[in-house]
Image (cartoon, rainbow, N blue to C red):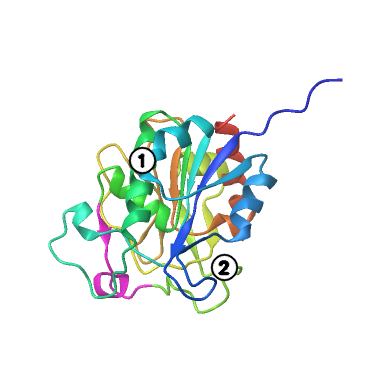
Amino acid sequence: MSAPTKRPTIGVTLDSEEPGGYSKFPWYAARQNYADAVVKAGGLPLFLPHEPDQVEEYLALIDGLVVTGGAFDIDPALFGAAEKHPTVKLKGRRTQFEWKITQRAIESDLPVLGICGGQQLLNVVLGGTLIQHIPDEVEAPLAHEQPNPRDEPGHSVTVEKGTLLHKITGAASLEVNSAHHQAAKAVGPGVRINATAEDGVIEGIEDPRHRFVLGVQWHPEFSISSGDEKIFRAFIEAAR
């Protein structure tokens, strides 16, 4: 009888909150469906606290990295912006940690999947910039902070032919959920846009110079479409 196939260990970044609500002291959090999606696709999730000095030790433990979303923004100074929009909310230690571990994972050619805010961080790490507030910079924008529940579609995206995302999903378009007020503005050198919304907002990026560096602006852990599950399966397969 053959031994069961070992599940690749997938580092999943946590969110952080100040005292209040769950605890009177600072606390970490993550939605359960991030872990569920990794397990369903064949991986073993390992949540990562924000310890920038321990990045190399974390990297020695994991086979792939998921950079999650959250209700906060990347410091505009990190992509060269002179001003910060009034809506921008920072979580400095989280960004410091995610920046460092994402950068080192890419340098080590570990598979990286950036989700929503994780895609935005990935885009900046790869040399791109961000739209700080979509309603102020995009003409006639879609409701990217959808009013309906997050486990339902908010709008569709067009998938670019010839991209890794197109190869994974086999779809020309996908129905996606949407929970963001920022998005990629310009992508870095060598980075490819793989999905866009009807209003022109960038919904997905990838770096073809690496075996798997993919960002999506929506939340595939909710499995809105079969394409979402295919994204996680392809990511886990790349981490084997």
Residue span colored magenta: 129-141
Q: Residue furthest left?
A: 82
Q: CA distance from mark 2 to mark 1?
A: 39 Å
Classify residue 105 by image quadrant.
top left
Q: Dot 1 corresponds to which residue?
A: 53
Q: Is residue 10 left or right of residue 142?
A: right
Is residue 189 highlighted in magenta? no
Q: Quadrant of the N terminus?
A: top right
What x and y, as percent, mark residue 174? 54, 57
Q: Residue furthest bottom?
A: 147
Residue placed most toward the observer, 195 or 62: 62
Q: Residue furthest top?
A: 1
What x and y, as percent, mark residue 74? 30, 58
Q: Residue furthest right?
A: 1
Q: Secondary structure at mark 2?
A: loop
Q: Quadrant of the C terminus?
A: top right
Residue type for callout 1: Asp
Is residue 138 highlighted in magenta? yes
Q: Earlier in the sequence, mark 2 or mark 1?
A: 1
